[in-house]
Structure formats: C-alpha cells, structure tokens
C-alpha cells in the first residue's frame, strides 16, 4: 500500500571554489523540468509522483546529472550543496525575473532570508480529512525531519551557531498557523488570510508542512513537508522519505493517531499549546539538530531529537518491512550514527578546516558521488 511521492529540489549553482553564481535564467531556457526561484542563484526541479523508491532514485539523480553536464558546457560551474549562502554574499538579492510582481514583493518583504535551498517532500493523500489529520501529525513531528537533514551551519563565510541557519532565519508565513481541525477549517482559515493580506496568494503559506494540490485550498491531494534542509545524498533523502511514508501509513491504519485527541496537554488550549510546543521544537532543532532537547507532543516529556527519531524508527519499522521499504528506511540509522551534513561539516571545522575548505571539499565529494550514482542508475533507468 505504498503512497505516491515526489520531491521539489532547490539547489545553488556556482563554482568549485564555492562561489554561488546566478544561472537560473539560462538553465530554465535550456533544460526541461527546471524552474526559477525569485533569486537567480537558486534553481528548482520537481520529480513526478511515483510509488517505487527505485524509480524515485533515478528521478532524483537524472536531472542533476543533466544539469551538471549543462553547467560544464557554460564554464567551470557546478552545484553547491547546503541550504544557505555558506560563503556569501548575503546582502544582495539577484532577481531571476525582474518583471515578476510576486518576486518584487518577496525581495522587498524578506530580502535574502528566502535565498535558501531545500527539499520539499510531497506524499499523496487524496481523502481530505485524512490529509488534514496527517498534516496535524506531521506538523508536531516535523522537527525530527529537520534534525535528520540539517545542512546549513554556515552563512556568509561564518559559523552561525545553528545547524540549520536556513530554518533559523526563514520567514515562516503567516506567523501563526494553527493545526487545521478539518478541511473546512483549512478553507476558512486560508480565505481569511488572503482577505487580510497576510498571504499574497495560495502558495504563500510557508510553514513546516502544508496541504497541497492543484486548486488550493479546495482540492488538495498531497501533504507537503517543507521543513527539510537540502540533503545531498539521494539515498539518505529516500530514507527520510521512507520514515515519513511509514508514519503516514501507520496513521491511515490507525485513525486515532491524531495529536488533537492523543495529546494529554490541557484540552481547552490544546491546539495553541501544540503549535507553541512544535514551534519551540523547530527552533531547538534549527539550533542543535540531532542533539536538540525537545518536548514530545503526546505528553510534553523532554527527550533528545535523536532519541525521538530512534523511537519513531522502531515504531514504524514493521510497517516499512511489511510494505517492502525497510531497506530504504535503514540509512536513517547511519544518519543517527554518523551525523547529518551540518554535524559532519562542523566536525571538520573544529578539526581546523576553514568554511571555504569545507564547502570546497563538500562540492567535490557530492559531485563524485552523484557521478557514480548517475553511471549506475541513469543508463539502466533510461534503457
């Protein structure tokens, strides 16, 4: 009973030295499947919704391989890992489409705080009330997925003190987003935000998780997890996705798995309390990722992010196994053991490497590993 899955991948383009260079206008004009972000230093591609992880791996790798080949043709350009402008500059916006009024609004309102790279994981759920229940559950557990994917400890050549500098500065909009108690509540809330101007359009809901679909908010068909930093290793990304999918399958099988009914936080203000608890957990994880101390939505107990992830992993492992995806889930254990990208980069920094040296090494390492994946995967998939 696998669900459909797709990804929106935002990446930086630049040089092997780590300089981020805006090339999205040329990329979008030359390659199918790529779209521009408001700042030209970002480019995005989207994978089609698929159920099988083997096919998803091909769809993650192939566009990057094509993009790398195109960038080589332009000059000494490559893809730059991480979710923030690690080496800068961070004080200037490079417009990809100067005539776009929505881009003008974003630049004037948020500046370079939105010039980040990330991965959005979309999971297909067609029943509207199941989707809302899934959004409630994933909202209160979203910090765990950021803890696994944090990859932005640097900004403008400096160590920021946060493992996800992206989520630390990203302007979540609107500032207060409730747990939607029903599809009707979601529609009512969205219409009120649009009328008040706190959202410019239906896409202007920038929270950790949101319902998504072709005619938002009326027709939604998927859950979109937006909190994750860009995770360079596609196999690791599929592991994070398998953890999320197994949790959602568990929720489908158990309709009582709902924070609004399972939480023992005070009943009168439970929605507000769960939102406040989740927001605090998000900020703790943005700071310390796997080592953050969090509070569980069920009863408020304190535990480390890595401990909570391990508990969740153990809980959904039988579900993953029965659905044939346990082999894709298992690399989560490697992340818990060896650390996410932010933790590994910070270890290199503490060992004496500069931010520039770390990023240059990461650029070369990711290029080499993607080259091997493309060689092994893309040709067999295309055949």
Image (spheres, helix red, strand yellow):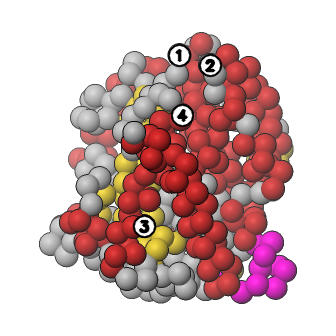
Q: Is residue 297 left or right of residue 27?
A: right
Q: Is residue 351 magenta?
A: yes
Tag 4 and tag 3, C-beta contact below 8 Å:
no
Q: Is residue 248 left or right of residue 303?
A: left
The residue depicted at 75 percent of the width and 64 percent of the height is 343
| Disc nearer the start of the sequence (4/3) | 4
Q: Is residue 220 magenta?
A: no
Tag 2 and tag 1, C-beta contact below 8 Å:
yes
Above or below, 90 against 347 in this view is below
Residue 323, labelled with which disc? Answer: 2
Q: Is residue 170 left or right of residue 278?
A: left
| Disc nearer the start of the sequence (2/1) | 1
| Disc nearer the start of the sequence (1/3) | 1
Q: Which residues are magenta?
A: 346-355
Residue 53, labelled with which disc? Answer: 4
Q: Is residue 209 visible?
A: no
Prevailing secondary structure class for the magenta stretch in the rendered image: helix
Tag 2 and tag 4, C-beta contact below 8 Å:
no
Inter-mark Cα distance, 2 to 1: 7 Å
Residue 68, labelled with which disc? Answer: 3
Tag 1 and tag 3, C-beta contact below 8 Å:
no
- Which residue was labeled with disc 1? 1
Inter-mark Cα distance, 4 to 3: 23 Å
**Looking at the image, is mark 1 or mark 3 nearer the viewer?**
3
Q: Nearer the viewer, residue 298 or 32?
A: 32
């Amino acid at each position: 009973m696998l669900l459909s899955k797709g990804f929106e991948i935002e990446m930086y383009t630049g040089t092997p030295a780590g300089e981020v260079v805006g090339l999205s206008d040329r990329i979008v004009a030359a390659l199918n499947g790529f779209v521009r972000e408001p700042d030209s230093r970002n480019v995005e591609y989207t994978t089609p919704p698929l159920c099988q992880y083997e096919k998803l791996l091909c769809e993650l790798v192939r566009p990057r391989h094509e993009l790398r080949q195109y960038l080589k043709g332009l000059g000494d350009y490559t893809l730059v890992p991480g979710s923030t402008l690690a080496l800068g500059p961070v004080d200037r916006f490079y417009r990809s489409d100067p005539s776009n009024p929505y881009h003008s609004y974003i630049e004037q309102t948020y500046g370079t705080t939105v010039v980040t790279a990330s991965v959005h994981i979309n999971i297909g759920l067609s029943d509207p009330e199941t989707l809302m229940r899934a959004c409630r559950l994933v909202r209160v557990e979203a910090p765990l997925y950021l803890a696994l994917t944090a990859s932005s400890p640097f900004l403008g050549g400096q160590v920021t003190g946060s493992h996800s500098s992206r989520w630390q500065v990203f302007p979540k909009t609107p500032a207060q987003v409730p747990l939607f108690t029903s599809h009707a509540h979601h529609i009512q809330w969205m219409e009120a935000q649009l009328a008040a101007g706190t959202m410019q359009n239906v896409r202007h809901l920038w929270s950790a998780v949101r319902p998504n679909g072709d005619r938002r908010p009326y027709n939604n068909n998927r859950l979109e997890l937006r909190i994750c930093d860009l995770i360079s290793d596609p196999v690791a990304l599929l592991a994070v996705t398998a953890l999320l999918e197994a949790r959602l399958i568990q929720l489908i099988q158990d309709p009582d798995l709902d924070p609004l009914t399972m939480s023992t936080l005070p009943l009168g203000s439970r929605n507000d309390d769960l939102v406040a608890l989740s927001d605090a957990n998000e900020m703790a994880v943005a700071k310390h990722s796997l080592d953050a101390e969090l509070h569980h939505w069920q009863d408020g107990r304190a535990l480390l992010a890595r401990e909570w992830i391990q508990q969740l992993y153990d809980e959904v492992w039988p579900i993953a196994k029965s659905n044939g995806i346990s082999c894709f889930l298992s690399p989560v254990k490697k992340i818990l053991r060896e650390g996410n990208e932010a933790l590994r980069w910070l270890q290199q920094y503490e060992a004496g490497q500069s931010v520039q040296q770390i990023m240059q090494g990461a650029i070369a390492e990711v290029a080499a590993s993607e080259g091997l994946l493309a060689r092994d995967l893309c040709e067999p998939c295309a055949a």
